[in-house]
């Protein structure tokens, strides 16, 4: 019983964890791409890694926190422009191919010895090297705080301050995306998603709208990358294809083209993921023929199966509109 | 506001929206009403029109070794309904795509309202006032009917990314657009469907929605790509009425069509294409008798009734429908 409580506490902790916020933010960005504009970005992790590198390297070079943040956003923008310029005039599939390979290229370059002085190669960048300016910003008093069953340091890496900052950023992103998508601008994006040529025939510059959406979602992705590395370190191999697929799972689980879908999806995903992983390690589940060292792999398989089940049985996600989806099958 | 003016004209000018409640008016009658009498224009290929809105010169489009479009010279009259007809594979839709910026020519140029618009993007062609519809209707399925039409409004400051975040900057424009959109929807009898997803509309309703959307942009010229394709006879009549209304409001209409009786009844001028070239043009009555057209287009079947006027008679139509239901 005590063990189950521990599992539950761990899972509750995941609801507020910085990584959950990072995935939520990345999924909000992906939602702008895919949910609202219909852009198939299969390299959101590339945007995140680039944001993390941009922030980390800028900070180590002496940039103040907010400047480093802007540099990360600029890196995301640049990446989006480079990917978008040649592909957004083509059919959607091309963007998918280009984004997945570009994200891998970023990771490979990061872990190569080529830029060792900046990126630290495959070992990455230690958290302590770039967290200083962020943690100095904290206005929380030192010490520990317990809220409900959750207890963390006020300041530090895995702290209340990191959580506060991360979720503030998520809320800010939600407000911006809400303002944008309820507007005529958002309507054009949805029009582009439904049929580019029809929107073009009405005199809209479709290319420019797609580029704007790609940049917005990419910038949100790079901010998510910063959040992701604030409690830990920058490790390029932790931000590869798997991360992209998890962001997709999170977005589809919550519901594409819904405002809160990515946030709900992220919270639910990590809550369940923790219960599965920690739960399989408890004595209660000893009857399962899964050795402890394989638990993470099995959990990974379950993530894949979940993604498939969502796409097959509930493609509109939790918050999605069933009626809207019925049209899609045509 | 020019917008409001257009709408008011719609109300007064188009006394019978749709015109499907009473048979289609005779073509000569509407032509006279619109003041578009092209009878004195010689029915020759490449003939100059009294007031051309669109002029194309030496337009060629090749796909590999095949020349899909090879148009030497064409003028399209302002404020008239011009039909572009021809057998399958004649290059009508390709020519149409070229004119509207959806395809690039190998050579040739054309001007719209005196300004050259060849090599301009589709969006810029549309912004210049030449708006098209598609043969396979493109309803934006997961947008509501009203949103579909609102999307078509031009010069909305809320469509700029940064301005869009501040509602006061675009709320007034949006409200005005909404009023206009609702009037247009009412005219096309889609007002009851305004909050439905466009994807739930029937094929014919989608055609109407596409036309409504085009109208929302305040075009000077509407390009319709097979507006009657896949539409039941009852709706064909209504569509014909709508197209005539567009002309009567001063818009120029160019449409590609297979449906011969539609062409004969509403067009002021007919351009016939075959194998990429324009083989004949002239008023609908005479052009069908042209030997080149008979050879190229009507071929062996010119004796069969392609322009069945009886279909436009509501009584005949009602009988046909009744027979259809009995089955």
Image: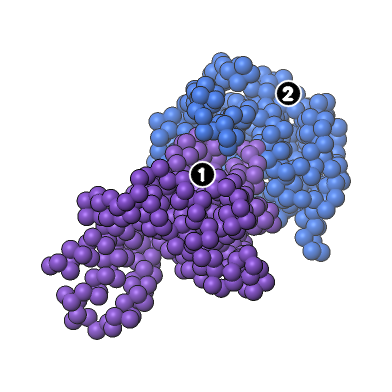
Chain colours: A purple, B blue
Query: In the rendered view, does A25 fall on the left or right side of B216?
Result: left
Q: Position of residue A98 (x, y in %)?
A: 62, 63
Task: Tell me the residue at 18%/77% (across/down).
Answer: A283
Q: Evaluate whether residue B139 shows in this view.
A: no
Q: CA distance from mark 1 to mark 2?
A: 40 Å
> From the viewer's perspective, is residue B18 above or below residue A313?
above
Q: How many marks?
A: 2
Looking at this view, name the residue that lies furthest to the front: A142
**Which residue shows up at 38% across the image and 58% down it?**
A158
Which residue is tagged 2? B36
Q: Is residue A166 above or below residue A232?
A: above
Quadrant where the N terminus of chain B is found in the figure: top right
Which element carries disc 2, helix, strand or loop?
Answer: loop
Position of residue A191 measured from the top left corner of the image (x, y, whole percent): 53, 43
Looking at the image, do the residues carrying marks 1 and 2 touch, with CB atoms under 8 Å apart? no
The residue at 86%/32% (across/down) is B48
The residue that mark 1 highlights is: A190
């Amino acid at each position: 019983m005590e063990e189950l409580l521990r599992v539950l506490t761990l899972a509750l902790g995941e609801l507020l964890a910085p990584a959950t916020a990072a995935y939520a933010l990345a999924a909000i960005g992906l939602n702008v791409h895919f949910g609202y504009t219909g852009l198939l970005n299969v390299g959101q992790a590339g945007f995140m890694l680039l944001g993390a590198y941009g922030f980390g390297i800028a900070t180590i070079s002496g940039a103040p926190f907010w400047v480093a943040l802007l540099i990360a956003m600029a890196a995301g923008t640049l990446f989006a422009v480079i990917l978008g310029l040649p592909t957004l005039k083509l059919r959607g599939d091309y963007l998918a191919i280009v984004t997945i390979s570009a994200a891998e290229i970023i990771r490979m370059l990061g872990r190569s010895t080529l830029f060792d002085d900046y990126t630290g190669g495959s070992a990455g960048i230690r958290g302590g090297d770039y967290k200083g300016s962020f943690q100095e910003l904290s206005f929380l008093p030192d010490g520990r705080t317990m809220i409900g069953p959750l207890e963390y340091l006020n300041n530090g890496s895995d702290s209340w301050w990191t959580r506060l900052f991360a979720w503030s950023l998520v809320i800010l992103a939600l407000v911006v995306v809400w303002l944008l998508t309820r507007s005529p601008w958002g309507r054009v994006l949805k029009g582009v998603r439904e049929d580019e040529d029809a929107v073009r025939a009405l005199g809209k510059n479709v290319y420019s709208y797609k580029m704007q959406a790609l940049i917005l979602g990419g910038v949100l992705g790079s901010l998510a990358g910063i959040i992701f590395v604030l409690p830990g370190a920058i490790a390029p191999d932790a931000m590869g294809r798997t991360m992209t697929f998890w962001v997709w799972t999170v977005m589809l689980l919550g519901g594409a083209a819904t405002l809160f879908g990515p946030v709900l999806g992220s919270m639910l995903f990590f809550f369940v993921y923790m219960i599965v992983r920690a739960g399989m390690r408890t004595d209660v589940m000893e009857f399962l023929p899964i050795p402890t060292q394989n638990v993470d792999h099995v959990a990974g398989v379950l993530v894949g199966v979940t993604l498939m089940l969502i796409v097959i049985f509930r493609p509109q996600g939790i918050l999605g509109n069933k009626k809207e989806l019925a049209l899609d099958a045509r | 506001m020019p917008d409001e003016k257009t709408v008011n004209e719609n109300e007064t000018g188009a006394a019978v929206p749709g015109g499907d409640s009473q048979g289609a008016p005779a073509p000569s009658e509407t032509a006279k009403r619109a003041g578009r009498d092209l009878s004195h224009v010689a029915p020759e290929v490449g003939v100059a029109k009294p007031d051309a809105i669109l002029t194309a010169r030496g337009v060629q489009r090749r796909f590999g070794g095949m020349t899909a479009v090879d148009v030497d010279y064409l003028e399209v009259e302002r404020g008239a309904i011009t039909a572009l007809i021809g057998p399958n594979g004649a290059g009508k839709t390709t020519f149409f795509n070229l004119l509207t910026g959806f395809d690039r020519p190998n050579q040739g140029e054309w001007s719209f309202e005196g300004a050259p618009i060849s090599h301009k993007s589709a969006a810029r062609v549309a912004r210049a006032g030449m708006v098209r519809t598609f043969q396979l209707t493109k309803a934006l399925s997961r947008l509501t009917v009203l949103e579909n039409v609102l999307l078509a409004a031009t010069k909305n400051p809320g469509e700029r990314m940064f301005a869009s975040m501040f509602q006061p900057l675009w709320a007034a424009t949006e409200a005005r657009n909404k009023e206009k959109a609702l009037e247009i929807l009412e005219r096309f009898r889609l007002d009851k469907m305004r909050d439905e997803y466009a994807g739930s509309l029937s094929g014919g309703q989608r055609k109407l929605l596409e036309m409504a959307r085009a109208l929302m942009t305040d075009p000077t010229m509407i390009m319709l790509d097979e507006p009657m394709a896949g539409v039941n006879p009852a709706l064909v009549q209504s569509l014909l009425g709508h197209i005539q209304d567009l002309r009567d409001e001063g818009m120029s209409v160019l449409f590609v069509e297979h449906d011969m009786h539609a062409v004969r009844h509403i067009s002021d001028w007919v351009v016939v294409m075959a194998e990429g070239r324009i083989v004949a043009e002239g008023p609908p009555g005479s052009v069908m008798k042209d030997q080149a057209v008979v050879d190229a287009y009507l071929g062996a079947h010119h004796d069969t009734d392609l322009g069945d006027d009886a279909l436009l008679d509501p009584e005949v139509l009602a009988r046909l429908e009744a027979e259809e239901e009995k089955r």
